[in-house]
Image (cartoon, rainbow, N blue to C red):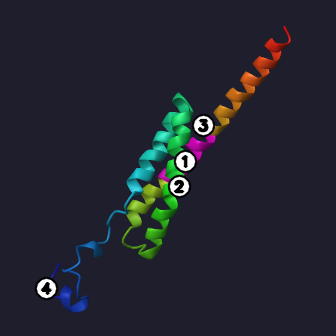
Amino acid sequence: MSDFDELLDPGVKDNPSNVVGSSLPNANAVLTLGILSIVGCLLYYIPGLICGIIALSMYPKVKRQYMQDPARFEASFKNAKGGYVCAIIGTSLSAFCILIVVIALGVGASLFGRF
């Protein structure tokens, strides 16, 4: 930064949070939980469903903070958006797999109930 930045935009040196490229709070948490929801859906379904629901519930707050100052949070919002997409995929796959297991158990119970 040059000495003339203070003349053009007073308060820039005093407030370090005005830096372009600042990270959104919980953006990385949304990304991490979104990825874990996909991994969890491949392992045991329930952890994937839980992580996905948590990531989906955290995303609106992150988006609201991004909308207040889009230029400042551009890079970290891309991470949050990626986590949101991963959370949707992981939650959907987990719910679908749980539904298949419940249907299979119901069919199995009805077949063995006849004997």
Disc 2 from disc 1: Cα separation: 6 Å
In this picture, residue 104 sits left or right of residue 94: right
Whether tag 4 and tag 1 are in contact, CB under 8 A, the answer is: no
Sequence-earlier tag: 4 or 1: 4
| Residue under numbered circle 4 | 3
Magenta-drawn stretch, dominant element (helix, strand or loop): helix
Find residue 22 and report its image quarter.
Answer: bottom left
Instruction: Inspect the image, locate mark 2, and give the three-letter code of the amino acid beneath it.
Output: Ser
Whether tag 3 and tag 2 are in contact, CB under 8 A, the answer is: no
In this picture, residue 24 sits left or right of residue 59: left
Disc 4 from disc 1: Cα separation: 48 Å
| Residue under numbered circle 1 | 53
Q: Which residue is drawn at 55% across and 34% down?
A: 46
Instruction: Inspect the image, locate mark 4, and give the three-letter code of the amino acid beneath it.
Output: Asp
Q: Residue at x 19, y 80 (%)?
A: 14
The quadrant of the image that shows the C terminus is top right
Given this view, does label 2 or label 4 mark the residue nearer the observer? Answer: 2
Dot 4 falls on a residue whose secondary structure is loop
Percent coordinates x, y for residue 67 in the rendering? 47, 72
Sequence-earlier tag: 3 or 2: 2
Whether tag 2 and tag 1 are in contact, CB under 8 A, the answer is: yes
Sequence-earlier tag: 4 or 3: 4
Q: Residue at x 45, y 46 (%)?
A: 33
Percent coordinates x, y for residue 38 in the rendering? 52, 39
| Residue under numbered circle 3 | 94
